[in-house]
Image (cartoon, grey):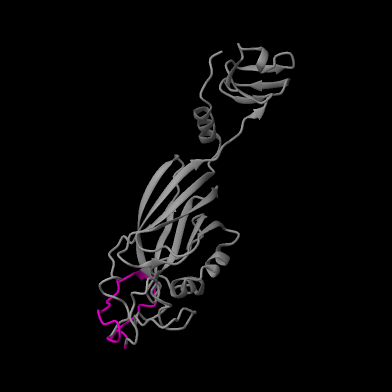
């Protein structure tokens, strides 16, 4: 008996019957020397978002952008999105990954704080999730929450409303800076202007190392592998069920595709009627 290749048959069936997808998401830090805090990813619809440029940052967004705390954003989208977190720090040149079941949600967003900055973050806003399985690469830019003055002083600050930068992972930041003169803030979420920095690691205007922590967008590469959810075949029934050519069924641990449209009878099980069924896998 001729046998079909099950993975191909199953994937075709899945594409035809289900829009839900599984996503494998990898976030690569391609900055020169900056670090990402834990990355929050969310699959959602068009009326839900983690951030929007041109608007004032929510307290939840400011918590993430100023101190790397994603708990507020997770709570904000609970019930209207599915989320996953890439834990730990993602250092320059490294990557982190998550797997998420997008269900029937159509858009993907992600965000994480950039260290050392006052309120800078890497962000992807409402990228439409493809329904075609495959691997997709997205160049992701940096944003400023507009919630804190970019004084570039590393002082351990990271709580909402507390000025300063939590730290510089890797130990390449400075100390005792006076702060950037004339620094201003727009009060709205906007494209990050980049850091100024200096080379004085014990004083000067900035605690940010100009030789290490400057970057150009894109600051991250996000790779999304889209995999269609498996749709398992129904079990065959002999109770006068109308089957159509191309239907896939299971019977006694095996899988069959219907070769001819017919109405089932108990005396015509797939294993005994090769004219009506073709086996696809033992």
Horizontal side of 223 relative to 250 (left or right) equals left
Task: Tell me which corner region of the image, top left, top right, bottom left or bottom right, holds residue 141.
Answer: bottom left
Residue at x-position 30% and y-position 62%:
217
Residue at x-position 65% and y-position 30%:
234
Confirm whether the magenta stretch covers residue 40: no
Q: Quadrant of the C terminus?
A: top right
How far across and how far down the image is residue 189, in percent?
A: 39, 71
Residue at x-position 29% and y-position 67%:
215
Horizontal side of 201 relative to 268 (left or right) equals left
Q: Nearer the viewer, residue 70 or 26?
A: 26
Q: Number of numbered discs present?
A: 0
Confirm whether the magenta stretch covers residue 190: yes
Per the picture, the main secondary structure of the magenta-coloured stretch is loop
Asked if residue 37 is positioned above or below residue 196 in the image, the reply reads: above
Task: Tell me which corner region of the image, top left, top right, bottom left or bottom right, holds residue 91.
Answer: bottom left
Asked if residue 189 is positioned above or below residue 230 in the image, the reply reads: below
Q: Quadrant of the N terminus?
A: top right
How far across and how far down the image is residue 146, in percent?
A: 39, 75
How far across and how far down the image is residue 211, in percent?
A: 25, 72
Residue with the most extreme front position: 171
Q: Nearer the viewer, residue 65 or 86?
A: 86
Q: Nearer the viewer, residue 238 or 196?
A: 196
How far across and how far down the image is residue 130, in percent?
A: 44, 45
Horizontal side of 85 relative to 219 (left or right) equals right
Range of residues picked out in magenta: 178-204
């Amino acid at each position: 008996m001729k046998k079909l290749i099950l993975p191909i048959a199953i994937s075709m069936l899945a594409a035809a019957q289900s829009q839900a997808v599984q996503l494998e998401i990898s976030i690569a830090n391609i900055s020169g020397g900056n670090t990402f805090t834990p990355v929050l990813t969310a699959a959602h619809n068009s009326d839900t978002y983690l951030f929007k440029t041109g608007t004032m940052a929510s307290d939840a967004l400011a918590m993430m952008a100023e101190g790397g705390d994603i708990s507020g954003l997770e709570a904000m989208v609970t019930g209207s999105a599915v989320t996953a977190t890439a834990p730990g720090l993602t250092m320059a040149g490294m990557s982190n990954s998550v797997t998420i079941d997008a269900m029937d949600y159509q858009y993907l967003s992600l965000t994480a704080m950039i260290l050392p900055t006052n309120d800078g973050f890497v962000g992807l806003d409402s990228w439409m999730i493809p329904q075609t399985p495959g691997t997709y690469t997205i160049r992701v830019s940096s944003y400023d929450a507009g919630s804190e003055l970019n004084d570039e002083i590393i002082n351990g600050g990271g709580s909402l409303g507390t000025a300063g930068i939590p730290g510089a992972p890797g130990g390449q930041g400075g100390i005792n800076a006076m702060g950037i003169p004339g620094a201003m803030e727009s009060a709205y979420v906007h494209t990050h202007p980049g850091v100024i920095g200096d080379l004085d690691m014990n004083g000067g205007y900035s605690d940010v190392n100009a030789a290490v922590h400057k970057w150009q967008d894109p600051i991250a590469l996000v790779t999304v592998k889209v995999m269609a959810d498996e749709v398992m075949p129904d079990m065959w029934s002999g109770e006068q069920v109308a089957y159509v050519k191309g239907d896939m069924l299971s019977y006694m641990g095996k899988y069959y595709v219907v070769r001819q449209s017919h109405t089932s009878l108990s005396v015509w099980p797939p294993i005994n009627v090769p004219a009506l069924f073709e086996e696809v896998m033992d």
